[in-house]
């Protein structure tokens, strides 16, 4: 999909989702074309991205904004080619290790000087997530909590309460299975959802510091502590806690199992709330809880991935790209795009406001008050790309064939020794 915004009333109509005062341009008049490639292909995020492009275009009469929206899964394999040949000026991507291959290949522009010049006031606390080799390579515009979204009405029907411990989780799951339902829906067709389960089980079994040491390649996959994580996971698998044939579903295709009441919960990021609401569930039917404690006394770590914008090293309109990043980083814009009518997530800018939405507020409270262990970016962002790919294949295989664990761990350990 490609949209070129310089269409008068049509462009202004696109900005209704972003109603509010436009930011003044600090770099003088912008001209030419600003080309943006984005992976915000789901309906809600796509509307936000189109609104951003249209509003920025309307702010600058002599500038045309050209937006290309690519399917989110396809973008993961296309981005390198897009950045290598006739690249756009600005692209969506992710923080931490996920940006490292493009930094190392010289495909992202070093924007340290823009940070040092004060372009991104309010983002100072997250500068480290965009830093590699003491240089800064992009800006964040949103982050979001992971956790357990569940059917509160079904819990009430079965007399269940939110579990705080693993023992309570397993007891709840047994009641749910006995009622003819699965405890959890999940779609592992694109692998990363299994990564979320490993993140939480490993952080809760062994702690955040151990989890990150494993991500850095400092711990063998055959370590007994890793096996303990899989043993806990297998307890849910063996009791029928997950929907059948999940490897054939994307994460969206797994949503109807929860919407229809065939499964009671989903371990997922907050972006799922919009889809659950669109599927017909009301806030009276939905609720959220933090993943329960497994090993008592371990400070709880959380997954809170950060999504980012980067300037391509081969950008043609650097002035417009810089102004666009400054605009997206502002407290005003981050407040608006992260609200329940937009991304339904959390603004990164410290001066932005958190939306008055049940799930956004719960996520903000959890991450700010009860994530003492630390904040992880997510399995496929904290592990190097090659290790993450091999690792997630193994995690999905384990969920389908748990008896293969020894072979899976041997393959992952061989990959660790090669990759690192």
Image: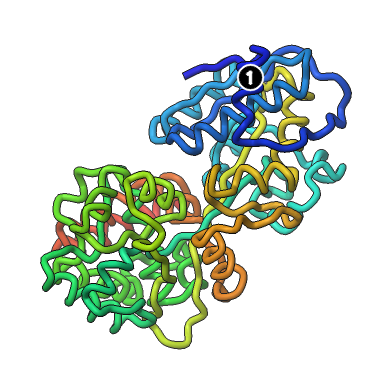
Left or right of 401, for residue 287: right
Q: Can residue 401 be seen at all in this image of the molecule?
A: yes
The image shows residue 14, relative to residue 278, as above or below, that is above
The residue positioned 36% from the left and 46% from the top of the image is 389
Q: For label 1, count other residues whose C-alpha is less than 10 Å away and answer few (under 14), some (14-19) or many (20+).
A: many
Residue reaching furthest to the bottom:
297
The image shows residue 7, relative to residue 69, as above or below, that is above
The residue positioned 52% from the left and 80% from the top of the image is 299
Between residue 211 and residue 362, name the one nearer to us: 362
The residue labelled by disc 1 is 11
Q: Position of residue 121 (x, y in %)?
A: 80, 49
Examine the image and state in which quarter residue 220 appears. Answer: bottom left
Question: Coloured how?
Answer: rainbow
Left or right of 325, for residue 94: left
Left or right of 362, for residue 392: left
Left or right of 208, for residue 137: right
Q: Position of residue 213 (x, y in %)?
A: 49, 67
Q: Position of residue 387 (x, y in %)?
A: 40, 50
The residue positioned 19% from the left and 43% from the top of the image is 248
The residue positioned 70% from the left and 17% from the top of the image is 316
Between residue 235 and residue 137, name the one nearer to us: 235
Q: Position of residue 33 (x, y in %)?
A: 69, 14
Q: Can residue 106 be seen at all in this image of the molecule?
A: no
Examine the image and state in which quarter residue 240 appears. Answer: bottom left
Q: Secondary structure at mark 1?
A: helix
Give the number of marks.
Answer: 1
């Amino acid at each position: 999909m490609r949209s070129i915004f310089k269409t008068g009333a049509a462009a202004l109509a696109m900005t209704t989702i972003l109603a509010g005062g436009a930011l003044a341009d600090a770099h003088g008049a912008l001209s030419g074309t600003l080309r943006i490639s984005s992976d915000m292909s789901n309906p809600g995020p796509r509307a936000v991205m189109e609104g951003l492009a249209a509003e920025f275009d309307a702010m600058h009469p002599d500038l045309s904004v050209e937006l290309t929206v690519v399917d989110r899964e396809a973008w993961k394999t296309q981005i390198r080619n897009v950045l290598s040949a006739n690249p756009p000026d600005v692209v969506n991507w992710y923080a931490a290790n996920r940006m490292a291959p493009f930094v190392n290949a010289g495909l992202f522009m070093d924007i340290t000087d823009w940070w040092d010049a004060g372009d991104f006031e309010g983002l100072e606390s997250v500068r480290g997530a965009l830093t590699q080799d003491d240089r800064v390579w992009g800006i964040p515009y949103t982050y979001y909590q992971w956790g357990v979204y569940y059917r509160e009405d079904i819990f009430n029907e079965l007399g269940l309460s939110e579990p705080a411990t693993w023992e309570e989780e397993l007891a709840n799951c047994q009641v749910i299975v006995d009622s003819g339902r699965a405890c959890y829906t999940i779609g592992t067709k694109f692998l990363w959802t299994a990564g979320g389960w490993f993140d939480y089980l490993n952080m809760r079994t062994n702690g955040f510091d151990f989890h990150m040491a494993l991500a850095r390649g400092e711990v063998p996959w055959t370590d007994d502590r890793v096996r303990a994580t899989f043993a806990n996971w297998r307890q849910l698998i063996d009791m029928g806690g997950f929907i059948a044939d999940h490897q054939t579903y994307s994460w969206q295709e797994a949503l109807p199992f929860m919407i229809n009441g065939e499964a009671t919960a989903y371990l997922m990021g907050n972006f799922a709330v919009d889809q659950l609401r669109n599927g017909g569930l009301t806030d009276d039917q939905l609720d959220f809880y933090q993943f329960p404690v497994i090993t008592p006394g371990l400070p709880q770590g959380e997954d809170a991935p950060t999504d980012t914008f980067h300037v391509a090293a081969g950008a043609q309109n650097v002035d417009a790209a810089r102004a666009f990043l400054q605009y997206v980083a502002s407290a005003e814009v981050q407040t608006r795009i992260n609200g329940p009518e937009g991304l339904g997530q959390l603004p990164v800018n410290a001066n932005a406001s958190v939306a008055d939405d049940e799930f956004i507020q719960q996520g903000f409270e959890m991450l700010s008050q009860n994530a003492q262990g630390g904040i992880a970016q997510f399995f496929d962002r904290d592990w190097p790309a090659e290790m993450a790919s091999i690792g997630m294949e193994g995690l999905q295989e384990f969920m389908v064939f748990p008896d293969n664990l020894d072979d899976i761990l041997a393959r992952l350990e061989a990959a660790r020794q090669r990759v690192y």
